Every structure is written in C-alpha cells, then in structure tokens.
Amino acid sequence: MALQRSCESPRGFRRGTSDGAATSAAAPWEGRPGPEGAAKEDLFAAPSQRTPAGGPGQGVARVQVRVWGGRPLQGTVTVSPAKNAVLPQLAAALLSAEPVRLVAPDLGDVGAMCDLLHLLGADVRRGAAGALTVTARGPLATDAPPSAMARMRASVLVLGPLLARCGRATLAQPGGCAIGRRPIDLHLMAMRAMGATVRERGHLVELRAEGGLRGGDVVLPYPSHTATENALLAAALARGTTRILGAAREPEVQDTAALLAAMGAEVKGAGGPVIVVRGRQALGGARHIPVPDRIEAGTLLLACAAAGGRVRVLGARAQHLGAPLARLRAMGARVEADAAGVTLEAPERARLRPADVRTLPYPGFPTDLQPPMSVLAALAAGPSLVSETVFDARLGHVDGLRRLGADVCVAGTQAWFTGRALLRGAELRALDLRGGAALLLAALAAEGESRVDGFCHVARGYDDLPAKLRLLGAEVLPEEGPPSERGEIAHLVTRP
Ligand code: UD1
C-alpha cells in the first residue's frame, strides 16, 4: 500500500515568510474570483468585496517549527471548518454539474483534494476568507492519477461520486498517514452493494456500473468514517433507495449529509447508525459552511491542559467533544461550554490526574486526539494507560515523547505512562499528522527549546496550528528546513 511518508509541500496554499506574511502561491486550479453580487457579509463574497482575513491561516508550508516551552497559554482562538467534513464535501461537488461553494480551512489535504478534482476535470476556484467553488460541469475523467491518490487517504472519497455520476472509476490505493493498515475493502463492498463490479488490476482497482448505480443495503461491519461517506455520496445519485447499516456517526458525516440535502438529495438518519438515501437523477449546486473542526478544537484545549493556563476556543462544539471533555474534566481541568465555544482552565501540573483512554469510533474517544492526549498521560500525577483500538500502528509519537523525558512502555497498541514526567526540550520529528501535533504540544509543556521536523505532516491537517498557538501566547516559530528536508515534489499539474 502506498503510504505518504515524505514531507510534501501543501500546494495551492499560501506559503508564508518568516515574519508571517503570506506570499502568493497560486495553485493550478486557481482562476477567476467568486460570484458577483454576493451580499456584503457573505462569507462566499468575491475577493473584491471582502478584505482578506489576516492572522491564522498564514504560512502553513514550513517544514519545521522551533518551540520555546514552559509558558502557560492564555487567550481566545477560533477553530476552522473541519478538514474531515470539507474533504468529502469537495468530493461531493463531483456529483453535480452546478457550482458547490464551501468555506475551507487552509491546509495541505484540502489543497491535495483540489488538485485531484482539477485533474478529474472540475473547475476549482478560491475566493476570499477560505471560500472554494468547485464546478464539475463535465465531462469528467474517471481514472484518478495514482500520484494524486497517493497524497492522502481521503482521495478515496472521489470513488463514490465518480462511479455514481460516470458509471466507472479506476483508482490506485490511496496514501495517507503511516498509522497502520488502511485497506479500502469496505468502500469497495459498499459500491458492490449498489451494483458495481470491482476488478483489481495490479495496484489499480477498476469499478464499473455501466447502467448506473442502484440503491441497495450497504451493511458495514465496522463504522468506517470515509466508507460511510463514500456510500452516502454514491447513493445520492443511485436509482432507488439505499440503506447504510452500521454507518459511522461522526458529525462530519452528518454535515456532509446536510450539504447533500442542500444539493437536492433526500437523506435521513445521518448521525445515527442507519442512513437512508433516496437517490436523485441529478443534483444541483449549493453553498455550505462546514461544521467546526472538533479535532482542531480538542487539540487546542489539550494544548492548554498540557502547557497550563486558560483558553477559550470559539466555534468548539461541546456536543461533538463529549468523550474528550469528560476525560479532561476527570483529569482535573475546568471546562465550561456555551453556544459560542468551550473554555478550559488547566489544573496545576501536580494536580493533573491520570487517566485510562481508549479510542473508539464516534461518539467514543476520537483516535485523532489520542496522540495529543498521550502528552497529558505523560505529565499526569500517576500512571495512565492509553489504548488505541481504531488503527494498529498509531503510537509513533511515543518515541518523541520519550526524547522529551516521558516514561512510557509500549505493548502492541497500548502505551503505559508512569506519569510525573518533567519534560525538557529536544529535537523531534513528526511522523504523521496527529502524532506531529502531539509533539508540538509536548514541546509547549517542556522546559527549554525544542525543534519539530517533518512539520509538513501537521500542516496537511491543521490550518496553521503554530499561528493559532501564537495567538494564545505560545512561542512557536515555523522555519524552512534545509532543501533536503523540504522534500518538495514536482507539481503534478503544470500551471496554465
Ligand atoms: C477517518 C478520518 C481520520 C480518522 C479516522 C477514524 C477523514 C478524511 N479521515 O479516516 O482523520 O482518524 O476516520 O476516526 O475523515 N478500515 C478497513 N477497511 C476499510 C476502511 C477502514 O479495514 O475499507 C479500517 C481501518 O484500517 C481502520 C478503521 O477501519 O483500522 C477505521 O478507519 P476509517 O474509519 O475508515 O478511517 P478513515 O475514514 O480512513
């Protein structure tokens, strides 16, 4: 399986300078501004009608960060739209010949998905304040280029839309973080249940549904997040009714169903274990602001719990963070939630209580917050157990925590932390997205200076996390690494 291990500059997004100013780095798909005549306060307004936002979102492409830790965090920060909602929603735009407009975070995986949509024949345009407009008027290419597929796991999300709209799709195994086995058998099973034939040819998978997909029962033996979304997207254009049984219940699935409904689909039950979709012959365009990123919100709250202080995270939805907030409270943090966001006051370090954390599909403790939560386990005043049940190799960050001074023993997918670690700055390397974020949090909690290399992994999934942490008083500076570290790749698409 192709796993993305190297650092790749997120293309199509602003590349910052060391003083935080963004430089223009137009992506191949960038073109004319957004729609004329939009309302003044409309987030989808054309660039000429809206002042581009400053602050977070600048300079995401740096490959290493330098951190001066040991300072408590203080202040207010706003979360971005959820990466894991925006990616399926960008793929959903392939279902319609009309424009789909989204507000998207400024991060590498969104750039990778835009590149992929462009390669498939969609027109992708960026407006102000994160607005992206995708128009897949057609005809669309149905062979997803392997190099584009290899850039991230979520590229598999084009499968359902291509098959539903064009009756065929050929793709290579998707890439993604090296956190364990990540087969796509459940995605293929879902497509078969809707009448597709699947043929594996070397590293390629060819799917056909020449007469179009037809509704059926998709029974998922495990609530895979993106397999549920692929089934949902495909079902929206399938003939008849599809039931997705054993569906993933993540808020991002529900939010994607909301976009589909705005496009004219009939979807019931999203957010629960059974989703029923009545397919339509065609879908229209839509505008949508995706749900706030609960993983980014959780990461920022955990950063404060680790480094100390008091932060308010605007946009964080407590109802989407049930398990992490319960764990933070149990560990001694003061957490208050209201309609606008979540405020966390960290306990004194010596009073941070140990915890047992076990990851599970939503509404259980999210696997994406397990690495950041491990930082608290290292610091807590006693032994903690962290069990990863979703992925089979998601403890890669533990080596970095050890370098900082954590006392931890790993057995399979479990990590036993002794606690009471006095963390000291070190040279660290991010190996994957959430593990890299965890190392940044640990460096904030450590005394002295640290450097985190391989930070491009983190920039793939967070909208300029260093800048958001700086808003909270953290000393985190992005830096260019040496050219060999930058790992810049040849552009997949030549610019027009
Ligand atoms: C999504 C999220 C990712 C998160 C993960 C689990 C996106 C873009 N990514 O990834 O951030 O960490 O959910 O919450 O939304 N599996 C199979 N066969 C399949 C599909 C999955 O065996 O066909 C297994 C995987 O190997 C893994 C488990 O199911 O062990 C969970 O994977 P899944 O829920 O599919 O994660 P993703 O959708 O890839």
Image (cartoon, rainbow, N blue to C red):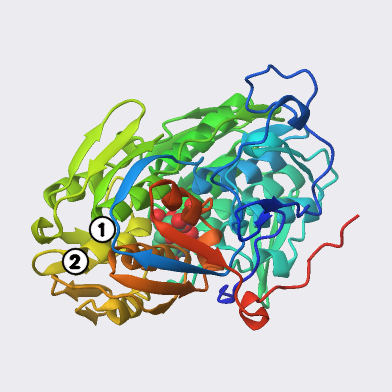
Name the residue carrying label 1.
Answer: 306
Q: Earlier in the sequence, mark 1 or mark 2?
A: 1
Name the residue nearer the viewer: 341 or 48. 48
Q: Where on the picture, by quarter, is residue 321?
A: top left
The secondary structure type at the circle numbered 1 is helix
Q: Is residue 191 visible?
A: yes
Residue at point 57%, 31% (across, down): 259
Q: Where on the picture, by quarter, is residue 489?
A: bottom right
Q: Is residue 180 visible?
A: no
Which x, y percent locates residue 409? Answer: 20, 81
Report how far apart the C-alphas of labels 1 and 2 lie in the structure. Answer: 8 Å
Name the residue carrying label 2.
Answer: 379
Which x, y percent locates residue 219? Answer: 43, 49
Q: Which quadrant of the figure contains the C terminus?
A: bottom right
Res. 374 mark? none
Mark 1 within 8 Å of ligand 1, using the beta carbon: no
Which x, y percent locates residue 298? Answer: 34, 48
Q: Where on the picture, by quarter, is residue 395?
A: bottom left
Which x, y percent locates residue 236? Answer: 61, 36
Name the residue nearer the viewer: 326 or 336. 336
Amino acid type at mark 2: Leu
